[in-house]
């Protein structure tokens, strides 16, 4: 498993481009990249990439709008730690970007927990709306809801921990967010390290003797209906160079295949809102020593 392939539906969004072995010497980055597919007026499709970063200087969010051919239409960088930039808007050639981060609450992740909105308006339609201040966003932008709505198709994130690594993921476009936990004890003296994946507190995958199976793939089923393929490469956790900084493992979760093929036609959802359009999540898991 040298490279994790891209997988994000019809647009083929790339989510990762290298393996742990080629990145072992790189400095950990505290960032989250999410890619959304949006359908707007006239049946047009665009991709909106939102990158949240956290550094010693503070938080930053970058928004880029691409067309269906992955050609960049516009890009804006917002640095909320500058008091004059915590609330505002930007008129770009292809879209309007509005944000209010003046009351945003942050945790360990670069993404805010609440008290904010960040939105993108295209042709007077709300192409993308992030945050819990929805009423304030629609009032500020005076825009209409997009008929298709925005669907997250890919996410890339750096996570940190000693033996557990946590994040959130949407494996279908029904809007539900799942708690995803990866656990692996690589401490000295552990004779049989085990890799465990839990979703909403339920163990869905377990790999025993992972120091011998440091690369592989498996499939788990979320909510008894969503088939998720899991790929992992944890080689650097066990065989990293002692003189170098701790390496990182890479995990990929993707929902590219249909749900359980053994279902009868009567059991297959017919509503477009309940069908997944394909989602991939790439996690770079850094061990804190």
Image (tube, helix red, strand yellow):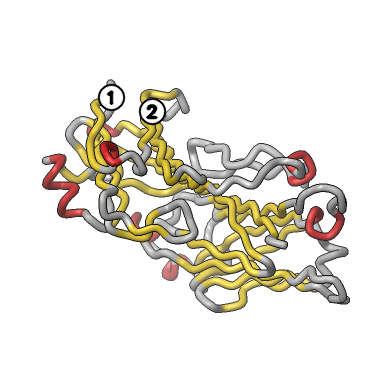
In this view, 143 is above or below 284:
above
Residue 33 x %, y %: 49, 44
Evaluate whether residue 203 shows in this view. yes
Q: Position of residue 180 (x, y in %)?
A: 54, 66
Q: Residues within 10 Å of mark 1 (few under 14, many from 20)?
A: few
Q: Residue furthest top?
A: 93
Which residue appears at 16% of the width and 54% of the height?
135
| Residue 29: image location, x then y, percent | 59, 45
**Marks 2 and 1: CB-CB under 8 Å?**
yes
Which of the 4 quarters of the picture holds residue 177? bottom left
Number of the label disc, if any, that sits on residue 149: none
Does residue 148 appear left or right of residue 113 in this picture? left
Vertical relation: 215 (above or below) 123: below
The front one of 273 and 151 is 151
Tell me the residue that label 1 is attached to.
Answer: 92
- Image location of residue 251, percent across then percent down: 66, 55
What secondary structure is found at the residue carrying circle 1? loop
- Image check: 286 left or right of 39? right
Residue beneath label 2, please?
A: 75
Image quarter of residue 19: top right
């Amino acid at each position: 498993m040298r490279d994790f392939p891209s997988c994000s539906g019809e647009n083929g969004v790339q989510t990762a481009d290298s393996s742990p072995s080629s990145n072992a010497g790189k400095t950990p980055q505290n960032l989250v990249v999410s890619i959304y597919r949006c359908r707007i007026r006239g049946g047009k499709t665009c991709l909106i990439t939102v990158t949240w970063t956290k550094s010693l200087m503070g938080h930053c969010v970058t928004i880029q709008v691409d067309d269906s051919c992955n050609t960049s239409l516009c890009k804006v960088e917002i640095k909320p730690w500058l008091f004059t930039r915590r609330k505002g808007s930007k008129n770009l050639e292809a879209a309007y970007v509005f944000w209010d981060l003046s009351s945003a609450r942050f945790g360990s992740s670069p993404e805010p927990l609440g008290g904010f909105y960040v939105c993108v308006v295209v042709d007077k339609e709300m192409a993308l709306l992030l945050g819990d201040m929805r009423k304030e966003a629609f009032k500020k932008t005076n825009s209409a809801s997009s008929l298709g709505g925005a669907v997250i198709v890919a996410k890339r994130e750096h996570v940190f921990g000693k033996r557990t690594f946590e994040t959130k993921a949407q494996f279908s476009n029904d809007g539900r967010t799942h708690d995803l936990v990866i656990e692996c004890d690589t401490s000295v003296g552990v004779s049989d390290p085990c890799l465990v994946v839990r979703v909403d507190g339920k163990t869905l995958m377990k790999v025993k003797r992972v120091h011998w199976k440091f690369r592989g793939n498996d499939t788990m089923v979320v909510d008894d209906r969503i088939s998720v393929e899991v790929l992992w490469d944890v080689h650097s956790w066990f065989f990293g160079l002692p003189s170098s900084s701790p390496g990182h493992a890479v995990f990929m979760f993707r929902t590219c295949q249909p749900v359980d093929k053994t279902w009868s036609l009567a059991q297959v959802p017919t509503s477009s809102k309940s069908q997944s359009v394909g989602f991939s999540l790439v996690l770079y898991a850094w061990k804190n020593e």
